[in-house]
Image (cartoon, helix red, strand yellow):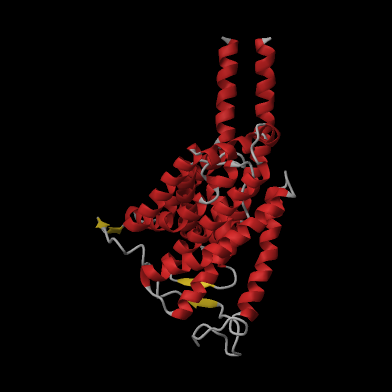
Amino acid sequence: MMTKKTSFQDNLIHFLISNAVPIIFIALSAVAIPISRFSPQYLVQEMLVRLARDSFLVLSLLIPIMAGMGLNFGMVLGAMAGEIGLILITDWNVVGIPGMLLAMIISTPLAIFLGWMCGVILNKAKGREMVTSFILGFFMNGVYQLIVLYGFGSVFPIKSPDLVLSRGFGIRNVTNLENIRKCLDNFIPLTIGGVSIPVATFLVIAVFCIFVVWFRKTKLGQDMRAVGQDMEVADSAGIPVERTRIISIVISTVLACYGQILFLQNIGTMNTYNSHEQAGMFAIAALLVGGASVTKATIPNVFLGVVLFHLMFVVSPMAGKYLIGEAQLGEYFRVFVSYGIIAIALVLHAWRRQRDKERARRALRGNA
């Protein structure tokens, strides 16, 4: 009886630790939703919009995790490539779905190059991939701003006066993407019970999910899983470890590029100099909120995380307003959540690894 009780307690503790972040967010949402006084129809509409807007970006993080490279903070490099493509198609005034596709075509070679560069650098920093990709994102953000602020209009000709600063070069702080705004979201219109559903965007996301499931079963996908589990064993088995890791980062960077384009076509405007920073941080936070860890992430983690993370984003300002009469508190809570949840998830991951080792040692003693 004592053994069964101890085993049950261990399993319960293990479950709570493994799912601590989603449980915390579900509890916070259960408290905040009634206080915010939003109607169910409004919340459903907001969650559908945000699922369509953010899911592709979050899904782009799965492949590097499978390859054992952790959370790819370097995904912002792909987002920068996508934004450069959007600036160019806005200048050329290519509208609708063709404009969005052209932006993807323009951005793909740049995203491949940036992903390759990121992968090569991360191979030099094995075991420290996350912090290295995080700092690399800061460095490339400076290069991006140099190109956009000084290169466009001087080195690269920009014809549209609405894009260029009054001095004749450099892009304005806000780029109007009216030419492709909601072009994919409204491609197959569907409204049920007053709730608008972006069918075409969800179809694209569904195709991406099928690709991820299929990719895991391919030879390259199996190689990435082997590398993620143990690089030395994979190398002994004849798998080109460094090449496989670079390919995983390249794929993630290209997919993040496409995800940023989908994200911005939904919004219709682009903060030229820092949209990519928010996309990377929020995508990683959403994935962790869904119950993913540094070493394991699944497609359900993506969708659960996007819903829970953005549900708190929607309800927290109004909950703060009705609770203490200050909506600004909810805004502060948003910033705390986006950064704090990453720190909490990393701490829990380290704690979980320690407990798993203890469980394994106890199991071995029990078998002995």
Q: Residue at x 55, y 30 (%)?
A: 15
> What is the x, y in percent for residue 61?
55, 49
Q: In the displayed structure, does residue 9 sit left or right of residue 48?
A: right
* Foreground of the two, 154 or 36: 154
Q: Residue at x 56, y 24 (%)?
A: 11
> What is the x, y in percent for residue 240?
65, 41
Q: Residue at x 47, y 54 (%)?
A: 56
Q: Is residue 334 visible?
A: no
> What is the x, y in percent for residue 43?
38, 55
Q: Is residue 255 visible?
A: yes
- Say which quarter of the image contains residue 77: bottom right
- As displayed, is residue 130 above or below residue 180? above
* Foreground of the two, 192 or 319: 192
Number of marks present in the image shown: 0
Q: Point out the residue furthest to the right here.
A: 124
- As displayed, is residue 237 above or below residue 208? above
* Foreground of the two, 122 or 58: 122
Q: Looking at the rendering, in which quadrant would you find the N terminus?
A: top right
Q: Point out the residue furthest to the front here.
A: 238
Q: Residue at x 67, y 54 (%)?
A: 133
Q: Looking at the rendering, in which quadrant would you find the C terminus?
A: top right
- Say which quarter of the image contains residue 194: bottom left
> What is the x, y in percent for residue 323?
49, 56
* Foreground of the two, 69 or 313: 69
